[in-house]
Each structure stands twice: as C-alpha cells, then as structure tokens.
Amino acid sequence: MARKSGIGTLLGFDLERAGPNPLFQQLYRQLRQAVLEGRLRPGVRLPATRFLARELGLSRNTVLTAYDQLASEGFLELRHRSGVFVAEDLPIAEPVAVATPPTPAPRIGKRGQATIGSRPVTDPRVAPGAAPDAKRWPGCFASALPDVSSFPFDLWARLLARHWRRPSAQLPVGGDAGGLPDLRAAIAHYVGEARGIACDPDHVMVVSGIRQALDLTCRLLLDPDDAAWMENPGHPGLRAVLVANGLQVASVPVDGEGIDVAAGRRLAPRARLACVAPSHQYPLGVALSLQRRLMLLDWAREAEAWVLEDDYDSEYRYAGRPLAALKSLDADHRVIYVGTLSKLMFPSLRLAYLVAPPQLADAFRRLRAALDDQPSMVAQPALAELFRSGHLAAHVRRMRQTYAARQRAFLAAAQAHLDGLVAFKPEDSGLHLVGRPLGRLRNRHDHALAALARREGIVLSCLSEYDAVGGGPEGLMFGYAAAPEHLVAPALQRLKEIWTQ
C-alpha cells in the first residue's frame, strides 16, 4: 500500500497492471509528464528506486528502467552517491493560468453548409429529450432496425476466429480495391439467385453503405451543377451526399406506384442520375410498379443518365417471392445496384455492396483505390463463408417469418389501443409501418406527436422529417421488427394516454 507522504501518492500515479503497455513505460510516461507540467521542479530529488518500487508495488528493475530512460533523454540526472534529481537545466517555467481566447468560428464552405444545414432526422435508436425516468420502452418502434438479438453471434464469432487465428499471407495485407475476391464471388452468386441479377464477381465492389456507394457514383459519373432525381419523401442521408457533390437535387414526388417518372421528366428532364428504392421505398414503403420501372429505364436510356437502385431490405417480403430487382430489367446497363448487409445482420457491421454495369466496373475500382485504398478486410472472409455455407440464407428465412408475425401482432395491438386515432394497413415487406393520424389527432402535426412520444422514451420518426419540399402527407413511422414483443401493447397504450390528454 502506498504511503500517504510518498511521491506516488502526491503525483497520483495511475498504473494499469493488466493494461497493454509495460509498467516501466507507464511509469516513464507519467514521470515525464510530471516534469513537463512542473509538478516535479528542476533540482528536486526523486525517491530511491527501492523506495519507489515498494511504494508503487513494482519491481526495482521496473523503476530503474524508467529512471534510465528519463536520464538518457535529459529529464533526470543520476548523481553518484547523491541520488536521482530532476535536471536543473530544463526550460520549464512556472505554470501560469492563461485565459483561453474564444475560438473563432471556422469558415465552412458553401457545399459543407448546404450538406449539414438541413434539418436532421431523428436517430432511429435513441429518443432525444426523453425524461430521465423514461426507460420503460428501450428501442420501442425505432424504424428501419432489425432485431439484432436474434443474430447468431456465436456462429459469427467462430467464423471470425477460424479465419483470423491463422490468416493466409495475403489476408492481413489486403490490397484489392473491390474487396475480398471470395466475398465478391459469393455476392455475385447470391444476387443472381435471389435478385435475378446476372453479374460477374468483377462487377461487385464492397462498400461501407449506400451513402458511400452513392458518393462514389457521383464522383465518377457526375459533375458539379448536374441535376439528380431524389425521391420525396426520401432519405436525407442520400440527399446530403448529392448536395455534398455539388448537384442540383430535383425532389420527385412518390405516390402509390413509387417515384413519379413523368414528374421527374418535368422537373429535371436532363438530370444525370435518379436515386430510387424500387422494391420498398423509404419511408413510405411502396413498391415501384412495373410500368414505372419501364418508364424509368426508358428515361435513363434516352437521357443517357444513370439509376442508382437502393435495395436495402428486399429480403424481408412476406407475401410471395421478393420482387425482381430493377437491375434485372436493365438491358442497357444504366442501373447501379446497391445492396446492404446491415439489415440482414446488424447495423454496425457497415458493409454493403455495389454491382456496377460491366462498362463501369474497372472505373469504379480505380476510383475506390484512389480515394480509399480498400475496404476493411476484418469481417469479409467470415461473411463470405456465411454466404457459402447457407447460414445467412437460413437466418434471413427465420427472420422473415419472425418479422411477419411481429407485424401481425403489432397491427392487432394497434387496433386494440389506437383505433380511431392512428390508421395502419398491412404491408407485404419492410421493417416498419406508417401510421396516419385520425380523428382528434388529425390536425396535430406529426412532429408534435413524435416529440410527446420521445419524452416518454418511445422512438418515433415522422414523415415530415423526410419531406424536402414541405406540404406533403404527415404520419408516424412505427418500427416493429426490433420492438420487444412484451412492450408493444403497453407502449401503444401509453401513446394513447399522452396523445389524448
């Protein structure tokens, strides 16, 4: 135990016995900092090595090593038969309290201001402004989130360990800008089987998410001031990427058949890109009709434009087979397809994939290499095996059944507790439902209703947050996929209480 009068107590050494850094190195750094900060003044004698070692519970060699290192750097003087002293000639002044001047606001470029200046969308995982005791509804109704508690993490851990316990010579080095070849081959096979997309592994590129895929697309194919179509309502994160690349964003309305291609032609006939989610538009949840799909591809061919297909959750379709991807109809190779693994596995994985038209595949890889070298290789070999072994497909099948049952249970609970206040209708796919205020709630703004819910800790997003033009339909997004089943009915009852008070 340290003595109260010892230097270890006075200087407040904090040594981590089980830490990653050797103890002598920790002691060296903390003594050095004490000298630099003036807590150990020039000429002060330090304790003998035996005394300090006993006080700190260290071996004498540990203290000797730290002292020797500091002496070799000129911080200490080892005087024969006199002891160890802080060097006299250190240029260390008396510590002076100096008022820190206010930091001027940094100059932010116009594109930066436009990118970050839009109204932020509520984080789907937290409830800002919740009361301190509002912890009864953890994660209740957060939209677009999968149920991560059902993911087979034990299997995932074994796969990671299998590939990294004795990795191949190339794996720690990486080097392929497109991603691990085994994973790209597995993805090419998967999208061919599940989405009807004929592609080679060389057309596939591993990315961190839809926003990175869109950013690479803009950098490769568009110039500043080019126009791009964006679904409205649509995801602000994608809009921010378009703005950050200096594009003119045309907000194209979405109706019951998906993006209104005729309206897009009127708003920006010479646009160079259209960002769409044909299988399950976010946030409205509608699917792009076959007629609209063909119209969109016709426009892209005529305008020599590109279509970025965001296929973020097509696997979760509860009636019949998943809809064919837009890219499967793309005879002119104008569609850039993006799929994500965040909804299939867990969001923090941050892995997605881009399937490029054949004529653009090499250019995408060279651009990626120029900007970002390569994607992280840590998870890719395990993910490739998860695809090949069939474990991922089995997990998706299980979750599809689970989410379908949860949607039915949610609708039953909503009928019991919110009947006459919020209208819902079943959906064939997705992880959330949109509720439309009725009756006494009809004239209340969705953001006001969402704010009341968030004060209770219940996370709801509102459609108005996704509307870039304004004046569109209002509604509330209820994510049922990750909502704890035992909390759904009590949470809906609580919403009825706070909304009708």
Image (cartoon, rainbow, N blue to C red):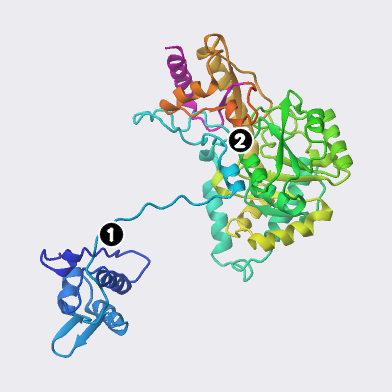
291 left or right of 423? right
Whole-angstrom CA distance, mark 2 to mark 1, is: 59 Å
Q: Is residue 402 visible?
A: yes
Q: Nearer the viewer, residue 453 or 101?
A: 101
Disc 1 marks which amino acid?
Val
Start and end of the magenta stretch? 474-501
Q: Residue at x 51, y 30 (%)?
A: 483
256 left or right of 476? right
Mark 1 neighbour class, 10 Å CA radius: few under 14, some 14 to 19, many 20 or more: few
Disc 2 marks which amino acid?
Met
- Mark 2 and mark 1 lie on one chain; the one further toward the N terminus is 1
Q: Is residue 134 magenta?
A: no
| Label of residue 399 in the image | 2
**What is the quadrant of the N terminus in the image?**
bottom left
Tell me where residue 56 sits by quadrant: bottom left
Tell me where residue 197 sits by quadrant: top right
